[in-house]
Image (spheres, rainbow, N blue to C red):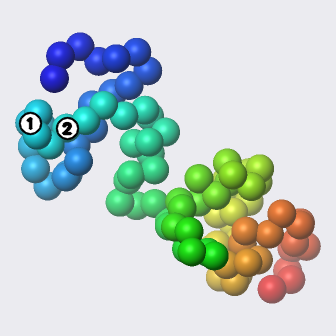
Amino acid sequence: MGEAPIGLTLERKNNDLGYTPDNCTWATVRDQLNNQRRNVVIEYEGRSLTLGQWATELGIHYDTLWRRHTRSLSIPQVLSVKTLKEGKR
């Protein structure tokens, strides 16, 4: 695949296959983090984004969204830009 472009690293399209030119692409670290299997993906209003992508888009710290998600709040509550008081569901 040649030398890596600045700011990009090698990523496999299909993790079950090897590092071959047909199965690899150049991606940013952020893209690679969003493509991991362990990510939590939330679908809301017709959009599917990882918690990290929602955090960036909404300007809410990732840890805040993660805590809300693990408390089994509704999706609108998880993604709310209003601060939820601890203990409220």
For the residue pair 86 and 40, the one nearer the viewer reads as 40
Residue at left 40%, top 61%? 38
Callout 1–callout 2 Cβ contact below 8 Å: yes
50 left or right, relative to 7: right
Visible residue check, residue 71: no
45 in relation to 33, above or below: below
Instruction: Place residue 84 in its image quadrant.
Output: bottom right
Q: Amino acid at mark 2?
A: Cys
For the residue pair 55 and 71, the one nearer the viewer reads as 55
42 left or right, relative to 76: left
* Image quadrant occupied by the N terminus: top left
Task: Specify few, some or many for label 1: CA neighbours under 10 Å numbering under 14, 14-19, or 20 or more.
Answer: few
Q: Specify the farthest residue to the front.
A: 46
Per the image, the residue denoted by label 2 is 24
Per the image, the residue denoted by label 1 is 20
Horizontal and vertical percent for residue 78?
A: 72, 72
Horizontal and vertical percent for residue 81?
A: 83, 63
Q: How many marks?
A: 2
* Image quadrant occupied by the C terminus: bottom right
Instruction: Place residue 6 in its image quadrant.
Output: top left
Instruction: Place residue 29 in its image quadrant.
Output: top left
50 left or right, relative to 69: left
Q: Secondary structure at mark 1?
A: loop
Q: Amino acid at mark 1?
A: Thr
Q: Secondary structure at mark 2?
A: strand
Q: How far apart are labels 1 and 2 at the CA level?
A: 6 Å
